[in-house]
Image: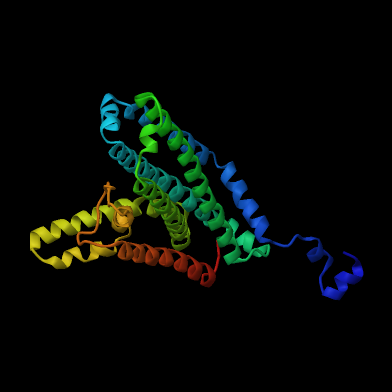
Amino acid sequence: MTATSISERGLSPAQARSPRASFAGAVGSELLKLRKQRLNWVMIALAVLLFGVMALGLGTSDQRQLLAKSPHTFFNNFLDIWTTTFQIGSGIVLLLVSARLMGMEYSAGTLRILLARGQGRLQLLAAKLLVLISLGLLLLAGYVILVGAYTAGTVIVLHGNLDPLRSLPPVAWQNLGLAALVQVVSIVCAVLLGTAAAVVGRSLAFAVGVAMSFYPADNFGALVLILLRSATHQSFWTKPSDVLLGANFNVLLQTLEPDHSSRPAFAVPVDHVDATHALVVIAAWAMLFLGGSIVLLLRRDVNQ
């Protein structure tokens, strides 16, 4: 940039030399932060180790008999186990990573520096969300490959070929696609929750604490409501469980499946809910997390 063009644009030489903050640069910066955090790699290594331990315990003689008798039931059991495992494992990883990635900006005081250098608040938030959701999708893709290879290998070992999988009815593969869709929704909500916890608390410790305790408290709350209904004989206590995020997540896949074959592993709404209700509740919570993050990030002054 020449001196003439600098003067024409009203920029000082120092401003002209300083790089402009860009969305691509923000995304690259967030990717670098993720790669540099050793805890992220430790969690992934532990997840792979846990996968191996679980895989060793599933190829039993009982599974051989079940595969020969009912391949569809065998497939549904595997689908329940592995989808629940991913939802829990990826949830822990993404909640912790998202809370740390946003919370560290407040605790380390780097958010103020980024904004002073011209980084837009919404641009920064969008970059973090994009990177975190991409991480979740990458975890899902890797998990699908591992589970697919393990399932095919198990069927070959137990039966000698892949005929049991080829004989599965179309509804089995439809359920598999729905399970993958539910995991994508779970990934998005985990990222939004962890990020919102950091923006609300403006503290790394607060963000991690809230993010990691939200779903356990949610599921425990559903059980408490059931006990209150039993103790008071008042149906009023069952209504709040219908709008709990975790309870609706737990029942979402079952409500979407044509044959409703999945079995929720944790607390579900006391009243019967359909897929539309569960999706609306989950969407409302997601919008609350995202909207709250945007509003607070825009309106609050950054002093630390």
For image coordinates 48% across by 48% down, the residue present is 97
Q: In which quarter of the image is residue 62?
A: top left
Q: In this view, does 188 lie to the left or right of 269?
A: right
Q: In the image, residue 23 lies at what x, y percent?
A: 65, 60
Residue 161 or residue 228, whichever sits in front: 161
For image coordinates 87% across by 73% down, the residue present is 7
Q: In the image, residue 171 lies at what x, y percent?
A: 34, 49
Q: Is residue 209 left or right of residue 293?
A: left
> Is residue 193 depicted above or below 295 in this figure?
above
Q: How is the image coloured?
A: rainbow
- The quadrant of the image that shows the N terminus is bottom right
For image coordinates 13% across by 61% down, the residue present is 229
> Is residue 4 depicted above or below 28 in this figure?
below
Residue 250 or residue 274, whichever sits in front: 274
Is residue 247 visible in this depiction of the protein?
A: yes
Q: In the image, residue 216 lies at what x, y percent?
A: 30, 50
For image coordinates 32% across by 28% down, the residue present is 57
Residue 72 or residue 265, whichever sits in front: 72
Q: In which quarter of the image is residue 49?
A: top left
- The quadrant of the image that shows the C terminus is bottom right
Is residue 246 visible in this depiction of the protein?
A: no
Residue 59 or residue 109, whichever sits in front: 59
